[in-house]
């Protein structure tokens, strides 16, 4: 007597000609899927006798159903939303997510990487804190699947999901230039952080395209702590040393919220209204602030979900997915007269 291999979610996806994420939506959020696509997936499920709650046990003999995720800073709502996207894809197919926070520390990241591998995870989703990807190439060679998140890969064998940060920086700078600004304070992270470096490159590109000299326009302040406290401290020092800047572009929304807090504390709503402020990430609270924050939106949830899909799709070749950012204009950069 022979035992037939149980159909997997990947089998269903291939039979229906859709992604793993689409199959997951049909199983859990059918209203999100077009009728024709949903019917095609359901037909594939019927043809293959797919049973969701035994997918993990039938997928591989080792029965490994745990995925590790190492994120940069789980306090930042951007990464929280990223984790939600990952979980939304893993949970419907009975995978367990183990989550760790590297706190942007390569040594801490290496520690969690080792712990996850010791626990026998089937794969790792990683927001790398350093440019050296050799440890992840080595893991991939050993059979541990790896997908880089919020980072791109120079290795055709290692999948990645990222956002075009250079374009994001350009969108922010172009908006401020269109507002009439010829002096922009950029509160950024260190250029060893890929996202920070590329956002600055985008700012410079937009200025050059507008006929401006970046060195004459941009006053860049580098933070170590990329959070509200760091933004508050930077703006407090800047106002004390050089006065109130007319326009500020912040490396993320948390820093921008700290900038707003400092200005309100120093001079109240009147001073806050004198400065055009742009953030980055478009976290949920950005639209709920007393002065809603203009921000460059990154689709964090979608990025996490797509990264998890790539990890689950073990049989496919590596892919490098790049999402496009979007500028969301709100009152923080439109209320003042330039």
Image (tube, rainbow, N blue to C red):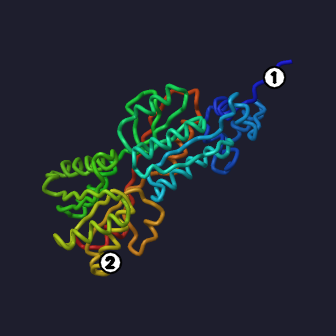
At 58% from the left and 26% from the top, the residue drawn is 315
Q: Is residue 101 left or right of residue 121?
A: left
**Is 11 or 58 nearer to us in this picture?**
58
SS type, badge 2: helix
**Is 17 or 122 nearer to us in this picture?**
122
Q: Is residue 184 visible?
A: yes
Q: Position of residue 222 (x, y in %)?
A: 26, 56
Residue designated by label 1 = 3
**Is 126 or 290 nearer to us in this picture?**
126
162, above or below 44, in the image: below
Q: Position of residue 81 (x, y in %)?
A: 51, 55
SS type, badge 1: loop
C-alpha span from label 2 to label 1: 69 Å
Question: Quadrant of the image for the C terminus?
Answer: bottom left
157, above or below 200, in the image: above
Q: Is residue 19 visible?
A: no
158, above or below 300, in the image: above
At 62% from the left and 44% from the top, the residue drawn is 90
């Amino acid at each position: 007597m022979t035992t037939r291999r149980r159909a997997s979610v990947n089998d269903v996806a291939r039979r229906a000609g859709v992604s793993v994420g689409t199959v997951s939506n049909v199983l859990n959020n059918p209203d999100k899927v077009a009728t024709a696509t949903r019917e095609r997936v359901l037909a594939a499920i019927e043809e293959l006798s797919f049973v969701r709650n035994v997918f993990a046990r039938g997928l591989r003999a080792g029965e490994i159903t745990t995925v590790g995720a190492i994120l940069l800073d789980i306090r930042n709502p951007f990464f929280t939303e990223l984790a939600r996207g990952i979980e939304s894809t893993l949970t419907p197919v009975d995978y367990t997510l183990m989550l760790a926070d590297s706190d942007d520390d390569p040594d801490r990241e290496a520690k969690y990487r080792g712990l996850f591998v010791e626990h026998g995870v089937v794969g790792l989703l990683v927001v790398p804190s350093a440019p050296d990807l050799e440890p992840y190439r080595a893991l991939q060679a050993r059979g541990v699947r790896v997908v880089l998140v919020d980072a791109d890969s120079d290795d055709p064998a290692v999948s990645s999901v990222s956002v075009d940060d250079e374009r994001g920086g350009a969108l922010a700078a172009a908006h401020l230039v269109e507002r009439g600004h010829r002096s922009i304070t950029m509160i950024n992270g260190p250029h060893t952080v890929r996202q920070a470096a590329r956002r600055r490159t985008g700012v410079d590109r937009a200025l050059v395209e507008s006929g401006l000299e970046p060195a004459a326009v941009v006053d860049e302040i580098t933070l170590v702590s990329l959070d509200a406290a760091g933004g508050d401290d930077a703006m407090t020092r800047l106002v004390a040393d050089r006065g109130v800047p007319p326009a500020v572009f912040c490396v993320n929304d948390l820093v921008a919220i700290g900038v707003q807090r400092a200005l309100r504390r120093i001079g109240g709503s009147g001073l806050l209204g004198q400065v055009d402020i742009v953030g980055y990430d478009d976290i949920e609270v950005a639209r709920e602030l007393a002065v809603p924050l203009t921000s460059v939106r990154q689709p964090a949830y979608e990025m996490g979900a797509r990264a998890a899909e790539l990890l689950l799709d073990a049989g496919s070749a590596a892919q490098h997915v790049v999402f496009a950012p979007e500028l969301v204009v709100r009152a923080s950069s439109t209320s003042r007269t330039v």
